Image: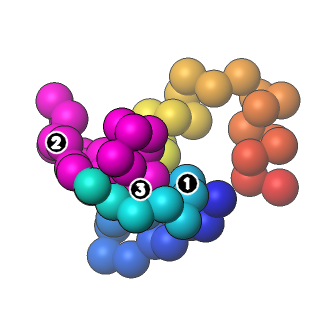
Amino acid sequence: MKVHYDKDILMLILSNKKVDDSYETEEGNIVSVSKNKEPVIIDIFNASKFLKNLGKVLPKNLQKQLWA
């Protein structure tokens, strides 16, 4: 997995498969999928807010592993 962050957009690249289609989530983020509907890229807009909220719900031990 690769992670890019720029202009408060967090892009999670989950695989190198070709993107076939993209869907907008209820929160306004974008999930791009392969021909087999497997997630390939996830674009999270307003990432600073997302990460702040994520810190409130993730257990402390998991936070340490993610941010290490």
| Identity of the residue drawn at 34% across and 47% down | 35
Question: Mark 1 highlights which residue?
Answer: 14
Mark 3 lies on a secondary structure that is strand
* Crowdedness near tag 1: few (<14), some (14–19) or many (≥20) residues, C-alpha within 10 Å: some
Q: Is residue 27 magenta?
A: yes
Q: Which residue is mark 2?
A: 24
Location of residue 3 in the rendering, given as x and y in whole percent from the top left corner: 56, 66
Between the residue at mark 3 and the residue at mark 1, the CA separation in whole angstroms equals 6 Å
Specify whether residue 11 is in view: yes
Q: Nearer the viewer, residue 10 or 42?
A: 42
Which kind of residue does numbered mark 2 sit on? Glu
The x, y position of residue 57, in whole percent, is 55, 22
The residue tagged 3 is: 41
Residues at circles 3 and 1 in contact by the CB criterion of under 8 Å: yes
Name the amino acid type tagged 3.
Answer: Ile
Whether tag 3 and tag 2 are in contact, CB under 8 A, the answer is no
Q: Earlier in the sequence, mark 2 or mark 1?
A: 1
Residue situated furthest bottom in the rendering: 6
Does residue 67 show up magenta in the picture? no
Q: Is residue 65 above or below residue 53?
A: below
CA gap, disc 3 to disc 2?
Answer: 12 Å
Residue 1 badge: none
Question: Which amino acid, by three-letter code, is at mark 1?
Answer: Leu
* Magenta region: 21-44
